[in-house]
């Protein structure tokens, strides 16, 4: 079999997340967070105004299935579209392992106000 390459593939459950607005602070539900994750890094983008930096935050992860509202407030500017506009906000969540290695990513979106 000289020169041949073998592709081995398998299906793994993908890291995913969802959130709901609690005022302007989100609460998250997590599913299938990557094995070896020690931290979760959240970054929010307003898809109508992607140049505005809303920030996010990084929290310790020890297997919890949810992240409560207000978990990262010091580095986060909540949604604030000018009335009567409705904007769509996207969170990218990175699962980080030892040394900050990215082990997985999840993306979730929701409109504000709903």
Image (cartoon, rainbow, N blue to C red):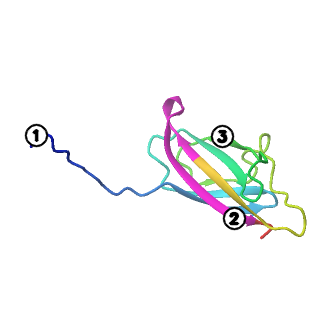
Q: How crowded is mark 1: few (under 14 residues within 10 Å), some or many (20 or more)?
A: few
Label 1: which residue? 2
The stretch in magenta equals 94-111
Q: Is residue 12 magenta?
A: no
Q: How many marks?
A: 3
Label 2: which residue? 110
User: Looking at the image, which is closer to me, 8 or 31?
Assistant: 8
Q: Which quadrant: the C terminus? A: bottom right
Label 3: which residue? 58
Q: What element carries label 1?
A: loop
- Residue ID at (60%, 49%): 93
Residue 108 image offset from top left, x and y in percent: 61, 59
Query: Horizontally, is 107 left or right of 35 in the view?
Result: right
User: Which residue in the rendered view is the most extreme toward the front?
Assistant: 3
Comparing marks 3 and 2, which lies closer to the viewer? Answer: 2
Comparing marks 1 and 2, which lies closer to the viewer? Answer: 1
């Amino acid at each position: 079999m000289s020169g041949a390459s073998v592709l081995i593939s398998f299906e793994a459950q993908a890291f995913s997340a969802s959130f709901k607005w609690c005022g302007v602070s989100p609460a998250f539900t997590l599913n299938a967070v990557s094995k070896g994750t020690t931290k979760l890094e959240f970054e929010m983008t307003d898809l109508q105004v992607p140049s505005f930096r809303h920030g996010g935050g990084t929290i310790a992860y020890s297997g919890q299935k949810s992240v409560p509202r207000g978990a990262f407030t010091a580095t986060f500017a909540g949604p604030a579209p000018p009335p009567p506009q409705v904007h769509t906000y996207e969170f990218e969540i990175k699962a980080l392992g030892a040394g900050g290695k990215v082990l997985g990513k999840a993306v979730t979106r929701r409109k504000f106000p709903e």
